[in-house]
Each structure stands twice: as structure tokens, then as C-alpha cells.
Image (cartoon, rainbow, N blue to C red):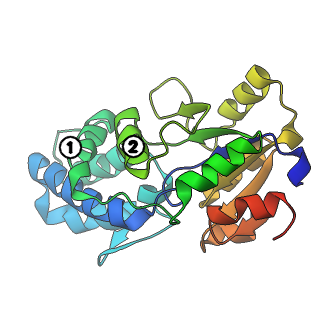
Amino acid sequence: MGNNIKAIIFDKDGTLMQFDPFWLPVALAATGEIAESLGIENHLDTVRLAIGLHNGAVDSRGILCSGTYEQIADVFDAVLQQCENPQTVSGLQVAQVFEKHTCEGEVMPVCNNLPDVLEGLIERGIKLFLVTTDNPAITKICLTGLGIKDKFERIFCDDGTHPNKPNPRIIEEILADYGFERKNLCMVGDTMTDVKFAHNGKITSVCVGNGDAREKADYALSDVSQLLSFLNNEV
């Protein structure tokens, strides 16, 4: 497979950046503020459980890991309806509160040599892309903290211009704009959303980490530091 790959699409959270050190404190602070502003503090545990937060742990299959701000907003709206509270909250409002609390989180790479790993792929002639359901502001904060903001050919965020994963439209756009064949492109991520995104776009899926998605992906690695060896058929 290695000789065919000319481009790699990366997920961000859980793939390039450790998820829990950043998102757990951010999500706890943000959901707390939103619940208080809506007057539903008594239902905060219900909201957190519904998005995949329980007893200080994150469910890798939950909305927080694999979903969007719109889906988090939908959880709040469902609770508001149950409480017969006429207020609503939008995905944009949720994103803004999460962005406000990014200072609560710690940006930590998944491996010690992450910038060198990506630079090694670039030196091999591979173009790198990032596709995340995060908004542009938080994505910039994370990539800057990781020291890899300048490593990507293009960065696709949740800015309203493209449908979110697993819709394969971004894959089709990359293929068309850069003239790649599907065999030249692979997706590296850590969730079933990433695997479905790759499969919907009919490209190779590579799962990193220890989540359930390993069983459904075409290939599985412990983390992105193994990518060069993998492409050299050494793993």
C-alpha cells in the first residue's frame, strides 16, 4: 500500500492531539455554563451523559468525541423541551461557549515527535490534509499548540461550507482538485466516524488508538508515529 499513497487526510482530536486532557475540562466548563444560562443546572448530569461524559470519563463513541456542536445543542434542546422551557440553543452558541473555555484544556500531542512525524511524511512527497468537525478558531488553537499548523496542504473545519464527516464530499473535492486516484488517498482517524468517512469515500481507512473503530478499519496502528514505518511496509 505504501507506494500508492500520495496524500493523507488526518482527523484531529484523538488522532493528532490527546482527547481527554483538552476536551474533558473544556466540556465540563462549557456545559456547566450553558446549563446555568438556560436555568437547567439540575439536568446537567443528564446533558453530560447524553454527550458522552460520565463520572469524569469520556465515552469514545459519544457525541463529544464523534459528533458536532449542533448535536450537542440538540441534547440541550431535548432537555429544555422536557422541562417545558421555551428557550433554545444553537450549535453556533455551543461552539462559542466551548471556544471561550479552551483555556481550561491542555493541548498534548499523541506522540512526542509529532511535528517530525508529519515533516517526515511531507519529505516523502505526501500531501497532508486535516478534516475536523471543530470550528476554525478552536482548530487553530489546537494546531498552534501542537506546533503543526503549517504542515497541512488544506484544513477543513466545521465552518458551514462543507458537510461534516462521514459525508464524503471533502474526499471527492480533494480527489478532484489534486488529481489523485482513490488508491492514492487514505484517512487516518480514531473513531467510527472517521472509518465511515473513508469507506463512504471509497478510500483506505487507518485507525489509530485502541477504540472500537480498529475492528472496522482497513488497517490499525497504535498511533501516528508508526505511519512512516507502515507506509514502508514495516508494520
Residue 192 lies, in percent from the top left, at 63, 59
Label 2 environment density (alpha carbons within 10 Å; few <14, some 14–19, many ≥20): few
Q: Is residue 39 visible?
A: no
User: Marks 1 and 2: which is nearer the front?
Assistant: 2
Mark 1 / mark 2, whichever is N-terminal? 1
Residue 172 lies, in percent from the top left, at 74, 29
Please tell me whether mark 1 sits on a helix, a strand or a loop: helix
Which numbered marker is on residue 144?
2
> Split into 4 quadrants, where in the image is the C terminus?
bottom right
| Amino acid at circle 2 | Thr
Quarter residue 143 falls in? top left
Give the farthest residue toward the bottom: 55
User: Which sits in the foreground, 91 or 18?
Assistant: 18
Residue 16 lies, in percent from the top left, at 53, 56
User: Which sits in the foreground, 76 or 91?
Assistant: 91
Mark 1 touching mark 2, by CB under 8 A?
no
Residue 81 lies, in percent from the top left, at 25, 48
Q: Residue at x 78, y 64 (%)?
A: 229
Q: Residue at x 12, y 60 (%)?
A: 41
Q: Residue at x 59, y 54 (%)?
A: 116
Label 1 environment density (alpha carbons within 10 Å; few <14, some 14–19, many ≥20): some
Q: CA distance from mark 1 to mark 2?
A: 17 Å
Does residue 53 appear left or right of residue 85 in this picture?
Answer: right
User: Which sits in the foreground, 96 or 45?
Assistant: 96
Q: Residue at x 36, y 57 (%)?
A: 107
> Split into 4 quadrants, where in the image is the N terminus?
bottom right
Please tell me whether mark 2 sits on a helix, a strand or a loop: helix
Quarter residue 123 falls in? top right
Residue under pointer 1: 100
Number of numbered labels in the structure image: 2
Q: Is residue 56 visible?
A: yes
| Amino acid at circle 1 | Lys
